[in-house]
């Protein structure tokens, strides 16, 4: 029992939890109790939250009304805390894969990846939809080898497209930093390598954008703020960026993002809103908003994001592109700005297993896939999302014979709240020293609200959240003993409208935010790999994504599944309202 009459749940021992289809576990749909606020209202709310007495009262009521007290703060549970979602370094049993040599350099590994791709005659991106297609990494490489294009030609077209997208008429706000001179210099070097017949790898000259949460020289890393780079200089590339650069990738700039990664809309009061290329009146999602939008708009075949709470998968789904989040620990964290990720987990203490690459030789190379579906959770979304995702599952069953089994995944809302406490507490700790030196006026108003809420969580709430993490890892292992993957819609809603009052202050829209993040949390809180694949559109023509959550270290299986889903759905792919064809532009 908490003070003011708050009472917590008493959780049964985790080994007694039933994950079967007839389980008596109750599904709790998020019942978020917080009005949408922007403009003057969000400024008033910040004043209240940052005042000592009123702030404490308001935060207590918010946490109580949104079930944080009941499900986490005052809950009773016997589970041991798990502070870092690291999984044992075991090579998973996967079908149709090639294990790549971890001792090889990035260029050699890129070549091994190339050899796993389908031939031109098997490629699902050939002429299945002659009216619209996005160009792939392989398309760029082939165009360079055949001298149809050069990296310099692509760089010039890219720069013109970014200038056009940034004009007052378009106002797409894809990038925070984009240096035309640097891009042209990289492209010129790549062009010379191709002319000599000595490209570094299949990635040589291919444009790739980087979320402004990762270090990429010569750009500062702002984290979507106006101040972070003043306290933390970027002296080297992040490890993942360094590897791309060593393969000759054309690094084209730092993409826009939600300030501090602390939101799901991608609305940034400092650098503008990265608008959705399918409908520029709508959000592209966050926090990796710019990265998803530039791929959707054809500016890059691939972009890097950071996924701390669905921040790659949400915008990928809303923008109609593929988004992959690997197993926790698969990608080194060195060079991240560490503003919205795990603190204790920056240095994993176990070795990662070997990397398996999927042999994408044909569209039906993987059989006997079992897909777990929790019906009540799956159906808790916009009606046309539910219909579209259900139809896609039917296609997979009919075309590939993949079986969908019904399961129960208990305490999903508890997991969402525990993840919120965790990421909020760790963000607060990461920024504590900086905030003492910082004038709050340089923060966006919505970010100030977020930081006030984050700072309200106690050490006991954090520890209980970690107990819930351990509990959920056990529960998900039970589910994975029956199935290869868990399937969900990627988001509970499609891209919603950007309102005028949000442009200068940002906005607080926790109802839409909870719907966007509804299916994301297991991937982050439990460190599991997940992929979202575009499968169709809602009645307004907005993209819908289907998500598959995998066992630890099974990225190859997820890529096999994504490849198969894409083969079934790519012929229905529609061209966005904003799209730049760097192959055919003049």
Image (cartoon, grey):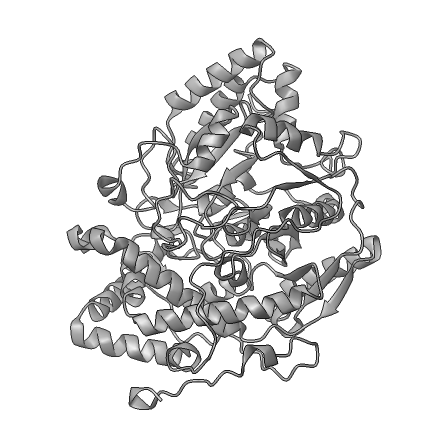
Residue 460 percent location from the top left of the image: 33, 74
Give the mark count.
0
* Residue 207 falls left or right of residue 21: left
Q: Quadrant of residue 123?
A: top right
* Furthest residue in direction top, as rendered: 196
Residue 278 percent location from the top left of the image: 55, 47
Res. 297 in view: no
Residue 485 percent location from the top left of the image: 67, 59
Residue 469 percent location from the top left of the image: 48, 67
Q: Quadrant of the N terminus?
A: bottom left
Q: Quadrant of the C terminus?
A: top right
Closer to us: 336 or 281: 336
579 over 508 or under it: above or below: above
Q: Quadrant of residue 182?
A: top left
213 over 469 or under it: above or below: above
* Furthest residue in direction bottom, as rendered: 5
Res. 345 in view: yes
Closer to us: 30 or 366: 366
558 over 98 or under it: above or below: below
* Residue 313 falls left or right of residue 120: left
């Amino acid at each position: 029992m908490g003070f003011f009459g708050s009472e917590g749940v008493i959780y049964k021992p985790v080994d007694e939890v039933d994950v079967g289809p007839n389980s008596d576990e109750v599904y709790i749909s998020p019942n978020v109790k917080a009005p949408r606020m922007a403009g003057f209202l969000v400024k008033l709310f910040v004043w209240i939250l940052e005042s000592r007495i009123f702030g404490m009262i308001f935060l207590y009521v918010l946490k109580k009304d949104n079930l944080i007290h009941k499900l986490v703060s005052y809950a009773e549970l016997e589970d041991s805390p798990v502070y870092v979602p690291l999984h044992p370094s075991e090579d998973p049993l996967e079908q149709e894969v090639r294990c790549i040599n971890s001792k090889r350099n990035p260029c050699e590994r890129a070549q091994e990846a190339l050899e796993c791709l389908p031939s031109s005659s098997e490629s699902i991106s050939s002429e299945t939809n002659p009216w619209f297609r996005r160009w792939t990494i392989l398309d760029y490489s082939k165009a360079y080898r055949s001298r149809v294009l050069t990296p310099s030609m692509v760089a010039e077209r890219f720069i013109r497209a970014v200038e056009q997208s940034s004009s007052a008429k378009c106002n797409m706000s894809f990038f925070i930093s984009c240096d035309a001179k640097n891009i042209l210099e990289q492209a010129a070097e790549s062009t010379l390598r191709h002319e000599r017949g000595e490209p570094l790898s299949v990635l040589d000259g291919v444009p790739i954008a980087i979320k402004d949460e990762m270090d990429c020289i010569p750009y500062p890393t702002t984290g979507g703020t106006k101040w972070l780079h003043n306290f933390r200089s970027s002296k080297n590339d992040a490890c993942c960026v360094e590897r791309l650069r060593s393969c000759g990738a054309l690094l084209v700039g730092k993409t826009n993002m939600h300030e501090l990664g602390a939101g799901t809309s991608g609305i940034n009061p400092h650098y503008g809103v990265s608008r959705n290329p399918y409908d520029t009146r709508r959000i592209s999602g966050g926090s990796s908003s710019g990265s998803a939008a530039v791929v959707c708009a054809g500016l890059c075949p691939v972009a890097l994001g950071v996924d701390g709470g669905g921040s790659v998968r949400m915008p990928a789904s809303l923008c109609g592109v593929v988004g992959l989040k690997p197993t926790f620990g698969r990608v080194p964290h060195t060079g991240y700005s560490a503003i919205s990720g795990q603190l204790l987990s920056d240095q994993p203490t176990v070795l990662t297993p070997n990397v398996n690459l999927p042999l994408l030789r044909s569209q039906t190379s993987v059989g006997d896939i079992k897909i777990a579906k929790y019906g009540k959770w799956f159906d808790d979304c916009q009606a046309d999302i539910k219909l579209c995702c259900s139809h896609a599952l039917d296609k997979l069953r009919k075309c590939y014979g993949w079986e969908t089994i019904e399961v129960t995944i208990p305490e999903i809302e508890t997991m969402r709240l525990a993840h919120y406490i965790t990421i909020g507490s760790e963000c607060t700790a990461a920024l504590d020293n900086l905030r003492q030196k910082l004038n709050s006026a340089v923060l966006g108003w919505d970010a100030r609200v977020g930081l006030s809420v984050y700072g309200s969580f106690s050490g006991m709430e954090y520890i209980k959240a970690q107990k819930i993490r351990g509990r959920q890892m056990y529960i998900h292992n039970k589910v994975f003993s029956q199935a290869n993957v868990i399937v969900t819609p990627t988001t509970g809603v499609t891209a919603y409208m950007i309102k005028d009052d949000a442009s200068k202050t940002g906005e607080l829209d926790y109802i839409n935010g909870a719907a966007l993040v509804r299916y994301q949390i297991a991937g982050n809180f439990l460190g599991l790999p997940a992929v979202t694949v575009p499968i169709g559109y809602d009645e307004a023509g907005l993209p819908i994504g289907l998500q598959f959550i995998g066992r630890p270290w099974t990225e190859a299986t997820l890529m096999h599944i994504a490849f198969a889903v894409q083969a079934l759905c790519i012929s229905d792919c529609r061209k966005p309202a904003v799209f730049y064809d760097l192959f055919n532009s003049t």
